[in-house]
Image (tube, rainbow, N blue to C red):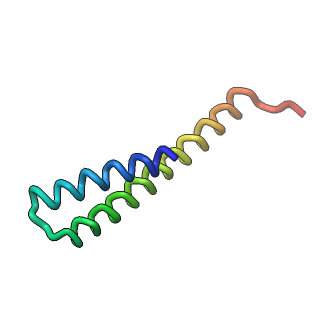
């Protein structure tokens, strides 16, 4: 959920920046919005997955299971 929200915000501001400052067309700005938004969402989701697997590994090492 956080990845999608952050991707939406970064895509929106990137599209506004490309439209106003870089003087791209509206269609190119929409392409920037989509590309930046999807890339940001995927990176945030990947970072959260990698962080959670590291936490699980650390918890396992701190509390070993005895047979």
Residue visible at 31% across and 50% down?
10
Where is the C terminus found, in terms of image quarters?
Answer: top right
Task: State left or right for residue 49 relative to residue 27.
Answer: right
Residue visible at 17% across and 54% down?
17
Quick check: 51 above or below 43? above
Residue visible at 20% across and 55% down?
16
Q: Nearer the viewer, residue 54 or 7?
A: 7
Residue visible at 59% across and 41% down?
52
Task: State left or right for residue 38 relative to residue 60.
Answer: left
Quick check: 8 above or below 22? above
Question: In which image quadrant can residue 11 be found?
Answer: bottom left
- Residue 22 rendering spot, x and y as whole percentages: 10, 61
Task: State left or right for residue 46 relative to residue 6.
Answer: right
Question: In which image quadrant can residue 33 be found?
Answer: bottom left
Question: In which image quadrant can residue 61 be found?
Answer: top right
Quick check: 2 above or below 60? below
């Amino acid at each position: 959920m956080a990845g999608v929200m952050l991707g939406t915000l970064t895509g929106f501001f990137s599209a506004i920046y490309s439209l106003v400052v870089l003087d791209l067309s509206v269609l190119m700005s929409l392409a920037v919005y989509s590309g930046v938004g999807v890339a940001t969402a995927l990176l945030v989701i990947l970072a959260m997955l990698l962080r959670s697997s590291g936490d699980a590994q650390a918890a396992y090492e701190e509390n070993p299971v005895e047979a």
